[in-house]
Image (cartoon, rainbow, N blue to C red):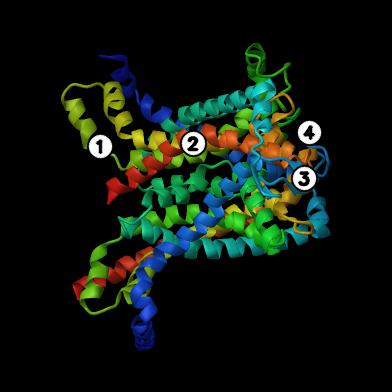
């Protein structure tokens, strides 16, 4: 190939350069590292600082001040006290966690058998099936959530189907919708929107672990007298633990702070912390309050987040 | 005979599996189908079918606000895709090849966290930082640049995951062979590694491009006056209720993205076949 000599001389010169010889390796690490420190980690300190001050108009009050020989440190914890005292916040945090947990449960319930049957489908059919799971994932999530509005309002496809099947009677009895045939702006519509959006995030890691499984283990279990059911619970499920945890975290954590889905499908009755944060910021213009709400959300997700990271790291380490 | 074996013998399991897959796909695709069908509805009301018509597509072509927003979104998505892939290569390399360095846990945590971190948190924290920076340095103005920074943060995480997966399964023999034959590390990277992971770069680009094209929350926090992206326009209209012109826009977007994804994966599949043939030929020679 003709470009090689040119490239070679270019690379030779590059390597001869003292800067490269000393720092080439480090540069690979440093560039993304510094980028993330500045744009990901550093903003969290800013948010923490903002939550501990007050604003007068557009001026943010300083925390540390040196004036006339007096060094004063002013930490304002009023926003946190307010969050603690006002039970609307407490209720909203709890409600967000509950919706996230319910969504995770349904995603696992629908997604596990789905991934299982996908992984056991004919090998030639699998790339096509995987592609079909990925495709909705690629097309606009906003538009797909919006589509549910049309499906669930009166006269929509799903609305008519659920009424015809008398599912709405059951939902009324479970207090998920206020009255028969009214699905929009209820806990039901919010849950269905979140399950729908996050289902691929559950299916993909599950499929990845299930399709790599050694099926001879199941044969061995059957030879030793295990029924398919026992084989499934004692072999398949434990081996897919990595996928279950990764998938659940990928659903649970972002669901806590979800904003777009409750805004489009939730209506005023459903409490979600993402919307509270949004309103504090955009409607009330109360930046320190929004920052405090955000800090509490971070505290809530920090444990699942650490879990997710540890797992992600372990999963990658095992493979190499 | 236990119940499980009885059902198995009846072919119930296979049927059940098929049924579950079909139901799942119906669930995943029904909203998209509804958007497409109703974009051709003559009536502005979703509940009433007033016959087929293309009137909403005609409206769309005249919608200045939407077209300006689309152009801005496409530019941001392109920059995001490109920069995510470049930084993603570096980050993936760091994670796969350098097993030990100071702060590795912090680094991998920072790369992975944006995958799951709620977007309202990322958006708010980044915005507050940029406002602070603007106060001290006088820049950056909120707009295209700041939206791109936010999208890159999330894009980097996704790009790294995609590229990392490919790097891990990469056959190191080829790189070692190049090194033994006298290639310098950087030559090995550009002439051996990069072509081998090229397909993952394409998928990482497409993924981050579509993520950026789709993002509402980060854009809402980071956009400034006059910088309204397409999802922001769609979102502000969708909040008010069902609008048939959005259905038309959705149909176009779904069409273009599906065509792009199908074409992309066909190209990737073809590249992989060619590469496999080349490797086989080289080994025979």
Same chain? Circles 4 and 3: yes
- Tell me the distance, in whole angstroms, between the alpha carbons under discs 1 and 4: 49 Å
For disc 3, the marked residue is: B236
Q: Which residue is mark 1?
A: A215
Local SS, label 3: helix
Spatial CA span between label 4 and label 3:
22 Å
Q: At 76% from the left edge and 48% from the top edge, which residue is drawn? A: A59
Nearer the observer, B122 or A213: B122
- Residue A181 sits in which quadrant? top right
Quarter of the image for the N terminus of chain A: give it: bottom left
User: Mark 1 vs mark 2: which is more N-terminal?
Assistant: 1
**Residue B245: % across, % down:** 78, 48
Q: Residue at x 32, y 56 (%)?
A: B168
Label 4 secondary element:
loop
Q: Which is nearer the eye, B167 or A188? A: B167
Do pointers 1 and 4 mark residues of a single chain?
no
Q: Residue at x 73, y 45 (%)?
A: B235
Of tags 1 and 4, the one toward the viewer is 1
């Amino acid at each position: 190939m003709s470009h090689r000599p040119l490239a070679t001389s270019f690379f030779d010169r590059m390597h001869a350069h003292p800067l490269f010889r000393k720092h080439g390796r480090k540069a690979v690490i440093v560039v993304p590292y510094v980028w993330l420190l500045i744009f990901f980690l550093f903003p969290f300190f800013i948010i923490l600082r903002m939550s501990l001050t007050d604003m007068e108009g557009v001026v943010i009050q300083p925390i540390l001040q040196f004036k006339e020989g007096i060094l004063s440190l002013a930490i304002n914890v009023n926003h946190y006290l307010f969050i603690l005292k006002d039970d609307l916040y407490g209720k909203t945090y709890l409600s967000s966690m509950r919706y996230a947990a319910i969504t995770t449960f349904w995603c696992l319930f629908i997604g596990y058998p789905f991934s299982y049957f996908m992984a056991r489908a004919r090998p030639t059919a699998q790339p096509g099936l995987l592609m079909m799971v990925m495709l909705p994932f690629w097309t606009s999530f906003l538009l797909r959530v919006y589509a549910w509005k049309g499906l669930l309002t009166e006269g929509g496809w799903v609305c008519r189907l659920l009424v015809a099947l008398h599912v709405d009677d059951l939902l009324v009895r479970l207090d998920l919708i206020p009255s028969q045939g009214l699905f929009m702006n209820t806990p039901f519509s919010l849950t269905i929107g979140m399950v729908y959006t996050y289902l691929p995030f559950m299916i993909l890691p599950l499929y990845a672990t299930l399709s790599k499984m050694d099926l001879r283990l199941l044969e061995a279990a059957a030879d030793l007298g295990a029924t398919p059911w026992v084989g499934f619970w004692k072999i398949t499920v434990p081996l897919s633990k990595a996928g279950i945890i990764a998938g659940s975290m990928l659903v649970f954590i972002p669901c806590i702070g979800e904003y777009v889905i409750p805004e489009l499908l939730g209506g005023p009755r459903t409490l979600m912390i993402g919307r509270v944060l949004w309103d504090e910021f955009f409607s009330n213009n109360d930046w320190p309050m929004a920052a405090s709400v955000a800090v509490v959300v971070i505290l809530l997700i920090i444990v699942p987040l650490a879990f997710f990271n540890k797992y992600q790291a372990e999963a990658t380490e095992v493979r190499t | 005979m236990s119940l499980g074996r009885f059902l198995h013998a009846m072919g119930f399991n296979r049927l059940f599996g098929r049924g579950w897959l079909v139901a799942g796909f119906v669930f995943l695709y029904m909203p998209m189908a509804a958007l497409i069908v109703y974009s051709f509805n003559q009536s502005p009301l979703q509940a009433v079918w007033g016959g087929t018509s293309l009137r909403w597509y005609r409206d769309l072509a005249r919608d200045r606000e939407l077209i300006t927003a689309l152009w801005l979104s496409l530019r941001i998505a392109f920059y995001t895709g490109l920069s995510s892939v470049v930084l993603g290569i570096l980050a993936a390399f760091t994670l796969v090849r350098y097993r030990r360095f100071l702060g590795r846990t912090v680094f991998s945590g920072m790369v992975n966290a944006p995958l799951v971190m709620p977007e309202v948190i990322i958006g708010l924290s980044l915005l507050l930082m940029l406002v602070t920076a603007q106060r001290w340095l006088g820049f950056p103005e909120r707009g295209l640049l700041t939206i791109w920074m936010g999208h890159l943060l999330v894009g980097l995480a996704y790009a790294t995951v995609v590229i990392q997966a490919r790097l891990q399964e990469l056959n190191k023999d080829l790189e070692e062979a190049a090194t033994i034959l006298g290639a310098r590390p950087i030559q090995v990277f550009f002439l051996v590694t990069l072509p081998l992971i090229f397909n993952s770069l394409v998928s990482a680009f497409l993924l981050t491009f579509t993520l950026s094209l789709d993002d509402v929350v980060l854009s809402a926090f980071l956009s400034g006056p006059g910088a309204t992206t397409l999802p922001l326009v769609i979102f502000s209209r969708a909040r008010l209720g069902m609008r048939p012109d959005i259905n038309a826009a959705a149909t176009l977007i779904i069409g273009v993205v599906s065509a792009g994804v199908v074409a992309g994966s066909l190209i990737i599949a073809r590249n992989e076949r060619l590469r496999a043939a080349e490797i086989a030929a080289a080994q025979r020679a």
